[in-house]
Image: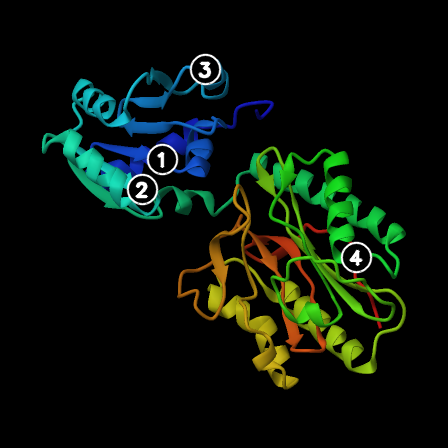
Amino acid sequence: MSPTPPPTAPRLKKMRDWLQESEVDAFLVSNDYNRRYLSGFTGSSGWLLISSDAALLITDSRYTEQAEKQAPEFTIAPQSGPFAPLLLELCKEHSIERLAFESEHVSVAACETYTESLDGEIKLEGSQGVVEKFRVAKEPDEVAALQRAIIIADDAFGELVKWLRPGITEKAVAWRLEVLMREGGAEGLSFPSIVAAGPNGAMPHHRPGDDVIPADTFIVMDFGCIADGYCSDMTRTVVLGTPSPQMQAIYRLVLQAQETAEAHVHAGLTGVEADALAREVIVAAGHGDHFGHGLGHGVGLEIHEAPRLSPLAGDTPLPAGAVVSIEPGVYLPGVGGVRIEDLVLLRDDGADILTGSPKMKF
């Protein structure tokens, strides 16, 4: 459970403003992260039913006490049987005739069940990305939670580099990272840690294996943890000894691309324009074909959320208050790779770098 409920009243207002604009009577929230964002409830099972004059949290007896503590803005609607008949009953009770739902988070089977149970009395309307759009610009309490997660990861990395040595395996490094983050107060990992040494570093999402890490090779480490429900995400590429001149040059290039992006990114740019800040540096050096992913992504309750910083991101401006990763990389198949990643908080006139771990210099 989170220690204190988040300020959900302004978030409910956003939802109700959307209802009015969309001319529907209510919205059904089924996604775990969206449910937590709007209500503060962290349980693993439940739905929100929000209308202009009602805010219901539907959950079963396992979570009743927890829901009452975590979601004071919501009325608890107990569930003791199948969900769909209860949904019909609640819609009738609250005069809901048009019900929007999260179509990207509801299976075809569930949708068919809802439709059958509502029996034409309630009109279902699928909607996408409604709550996710609200979550893009972070509120102060969200930034504070993100910073706690970042500090835990930073501290873990600082301890890890003191321990790191040639002859250990990628798996051992990943496990050590997890232990250090959990000992530092993490609720869990943001994602399975990536530890990729030598040629494995050319695979951006390499899974750590039993490969023994030799001296004089780069190790790409991408990891993060969860604090108060919010994720951190960072990548550092380190070396035990002296890397080849080729890989030193690649490291300098990636660092230049990242520093360029961090110096010039700001709210108001599109995700395409933000991506280009780093990509143009890498392309100019002849390695455009070796940077195959986007520059970054939003981070919050989920490790990957809106907005995207990518050539495919579209023309929506990045908002002030978004927390995004800046993570250019260059990957040489059969040789190795380099990625360096920070989280930054976007402002209208720039960005605050939240990640504190140092980077190598050659």
Residue 55 location (% of width, % of height): 33, 23
Q: Which residue is mark 4?
A: 169
- Give the SS element for disc 2: loop
Question: In the image, 112: left or right of 64?
Answer: left
User: Is the Cβ of the residue at disc 3 closer than 8 Å to that at disc 1?
Assistant: no
Q: Identify which amino acid the numbered label 2 is placed on.
A: Val
Q: CA distance from mark 1 to mark 4?
A: 41 Å
CB atoms at circles 1 and 2 under 8 Å apart?
yes
Pair 3/2: label in front: 2
Q: Earlier in the sequence, mark 3 or mark 1?
A: 1
- Which residue is identified by label 2? 106
What is the x, y in percent for residue 88? 19, 24
The structure residue drawn at horizontal position 47% and vertical position 47%, both measured from the top left corner, is: 136
Q: Secondary structure at mark 4?
A: loop
Q: Are marks 3 and 2 in contact (CB under 8 Å)?
A: no
- Distance (Cα) linking label 1 and label 2: 7 Å
Callout 4 amino acid: Thr
Whether residues under marks 4 and 3 lie with C-beta atoms below 8 angstroms apart, the answer is no
Residue placed under numbered mark 3 in the picture: 68
**Image quarter of the N terminus:** top right
